[in-house]
Image: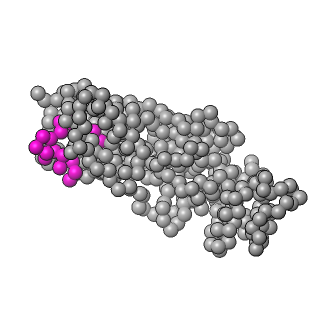
Amino acid sequence: MSMAAEPTGDGDTRSRPLTIAQLAELAQVSTATVSKVVNGRSEVRPETRALIERLIREHGYRPQRRRATFAPLVELVFGDLDGEAPSEVAAGVERVTREHRLGVSVSRLRHGDVPWIEGVLSRRPTGVISVFSDLTGTEREQLAARGIPLVLLDPRGEPPAEVVTVGASDWSAGLMATRHLLSLGHRRIAALAGPADSLAARARLDGYRTALDMAGVPAAPELITAPAQPTRPDEAITPGEPQPITGAAGSGLRTGGGSPAASSGEAEVERLLRLPSRPTAILTCADGQAAAVYRAAHRLGLRIPGDLSVVGFDAPLAGRWMDPPLTTVRRPLSEMAATAADMLLRLARGEHPARPQVELGADLILRGSTTAAAA
């Protein structure tokens, strides 16, 4: 069968997106079959779905009545729902959507045999905000082909330049946290690296190295843990079913949130603390790692902060209840989410943000886990 688009009564299909009828004519299937694919329904043969999806990617899809076909709903797709960060994100998005009389649906990204995107396409939301995760090129194309705008909130990897993103200045955060420890007289400062595929963790580590370099303090290789293998959500959640958002973070190593999941375990922390010239301070580059430092220090009989100062990331609530309370970098997740929601609604109105990539600053919350280095 010929896949070349032929001119129709609506004009040359090569120069404008196609309607369902035009897609059906090209694919030599019924309009009902194309409609099922467009709306994310599953009862279509895989080879037929692949053909229609390819035609949509090549030519685009023009909804006949856009206002009538998109639900008054913003879809939040999380890479991980653990920890305190998802609730902050949801609150920030809801603050914006409430003003526009839009609902919010929450689902979890799953890289497995049940495509999450089918549920999203069947709901046909006003837009999608992908949080703490990456979408594949095919997934982005599927959303674009249906006219569903996308904003990435704190993506794990490097997104294409044309994709709208909102993040935090993680390099500056790593610099700020390390400078705080340097100002307290610490010179043996260790850093726990996050997952190798995490832009946030790598940026924080770069900020740490820059702060040491600017202070004339050598970055000792033995004080920097190796990046861990990438982490992915491993629990299956049925697409299309809104999921509850957890609140306070637990004490485990693997938490959700904008920063990468914790990757350096207690054994690696113990290795650092057993060095002949052990660190007097530790900077964590991923959320949840501070809990591992506390446990390892306790087992080795080290006092925090008397023997070891600790700085965490993204634990403004959970860190308050640690003993001693954790000095932590707070990224403005609620504000980041509200910014992402505002940018998404602009895209839905056909506007393009003047700044497609936005970064917000972070704060350092000083608590009891850091103090002056011992003489």
Apparent side of residue 254 relative to residue 98 in the rendered image (left or right): left
The image shows residue 245 at horizontal and vertical percentages of 45, 49
Query: Can residue 99 be seen in the rendering of this structure?
Result: no
What's the residue at 76%, 54% (across, down)? 17
What's the residue at 68%, 68% (across, down)? 51
The residue closer to the viewer here, 145 or 202, is 202
Apparent side of residue 90 relative to residue 316 in the rendered image (left or right): right
Above-or-below relation of 101 to 232: above
Q: Magenta span covers which residues?
A: 266-284
Quadrant of residue 283 within the rendered picture: top left
Quarter containing the C terminus: top left
The image shows residue 324 at horizontal and vertical percentages of 22, 36
Quarter containing the N terminus: bottom right
Apparent side of residue 81 relative to residue 321 in the rendered image (left or right): right
The image shows residue 258 at horizontal and vertical percentages of 43, 44
Outermost residue on the top side: it is 183
Outermost residue on the right side: it is 9
What's the residue at 31%, 36% (across, down)? 209
Q: Is residue 118 magenta?
A: no
Apparent side of residue 330 relative to residue 351 in the rendered image (left or right): left
Above-or-below relation of 262 to 322: below
The residue closer to the viewer here, 138 or 114, is 138
The residue closer to the viewer here, 291 or 194, is 194
